[in-house]
Amino acid sequence: MKVKITKKGELQPECGCGTWLRHWENNSHIKKGLCSVRGCNNPADVTAEGHVYVTEADDNFNAFKFSGNDKWYVIPICKTCDVENSEYEIEQNIIPVFNEETDQCGQ
């Protein structure tokens, strides 16, 4: 799957998660580890969550759900990869989550 960083991490979420990284953890049910960018071995950084558009879905994701919409998603990335307007291939086990409030928020 390919994503394009459209905004560097900014305002905290309004959903009660506290940080975008915690929002991603709550909604993906995965704890942060390494950066989501394929081939990057840096740790994901709490202050550098990626606000991304999915530009190309792969077989592990529903292309209709993730491609061709104007919604932002959140993925964990490192400060080095958090470069606005950069496009990356992300690891297969990474689940981009909507940047909107869900019933999993604030947990």
Image (spheres, rainbow, N blue to C red):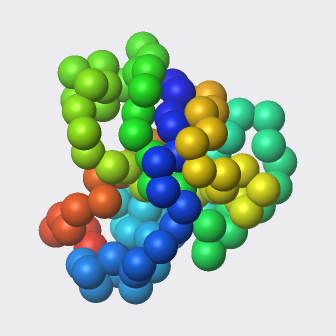
**Residue 66 against residue 57 in the figure, above or below:** below
Q: Give x and y (percent) for residue 34.
A: 72, 54
- Could you tell whether 65 is left or right of 91 in the image? left
From this viewpoint, which residue is outermost toward the top? 59
- Could you tell whether 12 is left or right of 21 in the image? left
Q: Residue at x 62, y 67 (%)?
A: 48
Q: Residue at x 62, y 75 (%)?
A: 47
- Could you tell whether 15 is left or right of 18 in the image? left
From this viewpoint, which residue is outermost toward the left? 103
Number of numbered discs overlaid on the protein picture: 0
From this viewpoint, which residue is outermost toward the front? 85
Residue 102 seen in render: yes
**Residue 80 against residue 104 in the figure, above or below:** above
In this rendered view, identify the residue nearer to me: 107 or 1: 1
**Residue 28 against residue 37 in the figure, above or below:** below
Q: Residue at x 63, y 33 (%)?
A: 88
Q: Give x and y (percent) for residue 69.
A: 23, 32
Q: Residue at x 25, y 39 (%)?
A: 70
In this rendered view, identify the residue nearer to me: 7 or 20: 7
Quadrant for the C terminus, please. Answer: bottom left
* Residue 100 figure quarter: bottom left
